Amino acid sequence: MHEKHIEGIIARYVKDGDVVSIGTGDLGEKFIKKLALALEQEHVPINSIEFVPTSMRSAMVASSLGLPIADINDKEIDVAIEFVDQIDNNYNFIKRNSHSFVRDKMICQSAGTLIVVADESALVEKLRGTIPFEIATFGWKRTLNQLDVWGKARRREMNGIPFKTETGNYVIDVDVDGIFSYDDLEFETKNIPGVLETGLFLGYADKVVLRGAKLRLLSRTEFKQ
């Protein structure tokens, strides 16, 4: 994403005094750096914000740039920016890469405005493909077998080592051919005792930024183009 596009999103949606959260990743770090820069530029009408980190890495980057850190225990989030892998026309989305889906879901629920960023090819009529599940390490094979009913399930590994979220849990990736009912999938899988959270986000997004040759902006309340 071009730097001027990042600046434009921040200028459009982040207001003076907001509590802000930004998803983790390379693009997220670019947003954090531009957010810090906006506080230093006199022509940008942002004098103060507070930042809620989504990971230890984003906390380190924000702290190194002098952004004031806020705790979600004490503050609700005004604006959150998240990076997603797939989104449908009703703004339901799948996020696959996360340091903690439990943490991400809490931030999305808190956010007054949730802006999701995705490649334009990620906009689909029906969500499909791999859906991640954050699960307890205790009895994880049992949980995996129960999730296997929904599609081929496997524990996520990195370099042959089980991947653990920052909240200390495993991630199970499930290849789902087609989701007939998002609500049923979310409800029934979270009724499995070992499942703590899913990478399926229903009804959280307010605005969508699609990345292509140019940015395409979608909003529940402003406009569609």
Image: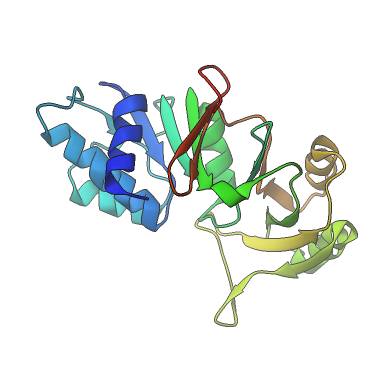
Residue 80: x and y, percent? Answer: 44, 34
Looking at the picture, tell me which residue is in the foreground, 171 or 9: 9
Task: Determine whether, in the image, residue 171 is placed left or right of residue 222.
Answer: right
Image coords of residue 103 (percent x, y): 53, 44
* Residue at the outermost left position: 42
Q: Which residue appears at 60% of the width and 56% of the height? A: 96
- Residue 98 is left or right of residue 87, and the answer is left
In this rendering, the answer to whether 17 lies above or below 10 is above
Viewer-proximal residue, 138 or 75?
75
Q: 197 or 92, which is in the foreground?
A: 92
Instruction: Give how far across and how far down residue 204 sits, in percent.
Output: 60, 30
The residue drawn where x is 40% and y is 37% is 21
Examine the image and state in which quarter residue 125 appears: top right
Q: Is residue 70 left or right of residue 142?
A: left
Instruction: Say whether residue 159 is left or right of residue 78.
Output: right
> Closest to the observer: 29 or 127?
127
Q: Is residue 73 visible?
A: no
State the residue lying farthest toward the top.
221
The quadrant the C terminus occupies is: top right
- Picture coordinates of residue 181, whole percent (x, y): 85, 39
At 85% from the left and 43% from the top, the residue drawn is: 188
* Residue 196 in view here: yes
Task: Look at the picture and state if 72 lies above or below 76.
Answer: below
Seen at 33% across and 52% down, the residue is 29
Report the residue that reaches farthest toward the right: 149
